[in-house]
Image (tube, rainbow, N blue to C red):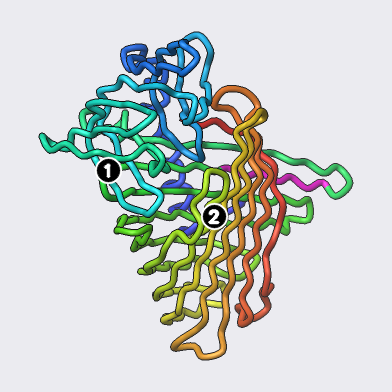
Amino acid sequence: MLTVPYHRKALIAVFSVVILAGTPAVAQLDDSASYTDRLHLKNGDAITGNLKALDRGKVQLKTLTMDTVFINWIDIESIDSDKYLRIERTDGRFYYGVIKKSDMSNELVIDDHGREVEVPILTVSAIQPIRVRESFWRRLEGDFSTGIDYKKAGDILLINLSSNLRFKEEKYELAFGANWNETSRTENNNSSRADINGAYTRFLKNRWFWKASGAFEHNEELGIDLRTIVTASAGRYLVRTPTVRFELNGGLAGNWEDRQDNTTTTSAEGLIRSSLEIFKHSLPVTRLSASIDVFPGITESGRLRVNTNVSLRNEIIRSVFWDLTFYSTYDNRPVEDAEGEDFGIMTSIGASF
């Protein structure tokens, strides 16, 4: 009879909660009452829909008749919207409020709790609606995906599940994620890896931010029953253009490990983290993202852990995407009789909301 370790049961249970948490939000995707924003274009056309964001030089507008459309920021004459917005300038400054007047040849006038702020159009780099008037479930954004791969030659079955949730406020964001990968072999040499993670990001002036995060990880290839890690870091967006974003941050981490050799370790580590994102709006909408986390040992001098993730995402149809992901986890001081590196390539199909 196959027995499942307690830590693995706990991770799978929490993973299921993260997946199901998005269900109420998905159920509200077709709420037509939110399609009240109106964009007036310089060629005389007007389009009504749900303003989702201005990002990378494009305004994303979700419509009832044309699915989601992307409109060049420079082609818009004016915007009619009563949404509460977070507006970011190219110099990293943020403004909050409702658009009171939009003369796209000159400036946006923002009503920030009764105080009018004028923002020159050419300095606006991003606009993000903040759903302060809506329910908790309506303010959740995220995605979920799954992939299955079977190899008859070795009778190997690969399964992966992934889910991400985001909650946005004026000056901060909360993000939660869950990943589970299972490899099943005929010789009963099965292995699995899973993680549950959460992060709080606080936005500061001039593209600076600070972040606190925590995660629970399980990896049989590396001999880790359960790793609990908490981090605190500060960083800055070094590049933030319409098509490229690059951030770098650093800080400290605490690492608690329950290992398969029945040992337990506690250590302090440094943290150097960088991430790169390249985005293409033309069909098919494509996003290439890459991140690397380096954990040099502090109390375990000489130890080095490195986590790498590279993902290519193509949108197939509205809100449905295909993912190709490479991951790698490296530890130069692995558990006895365990591997020092775990890596793989996964393909999956998913949906965003």
Main SS, magenta region, reads: strand
Q: Residue at x 39, y 76 (%)?
A: 252
Instruction: Name the secondary structure under disc 2.
Output: strand
Q: Residues within 10 Å of mark 1 (few under 14, many from 20)?
A: some
Segment tinted magenta in the rendering = 155-161
Check residue 157 for magenta coloring.
Answer: yes
- For badge 2, the amino acid type reads Ala
Q: Earlier in the sequence, mark 1 or mark 2?
A: 1
Q: Position of residue 136 (x, y in %)?
A: 26, 33
Q: Residue at x 51, y 75 (%)?
A: 295
| Quadrant position of residue 332 | bottom right
Q: Nearer the viewer, residue 252 or 227?
A: 252
Q: Is residue 32 above or below residue 23?
A: above
Q: Position of residue 349 (x, y in %)?
A: 64, 34
The residue labelled by disc 2 is 194
The residue labelled by disc 1 is 169
Q: Nearer the viewer, residue 348 or 184?
A: 348
Q: Nearer the viewer, residue 7 or 172?
A: 172
Q: Is residue 133 above or below residue 324?
A: above
Q: Position of residue 259 (x, y in %)?
A: 53, 73
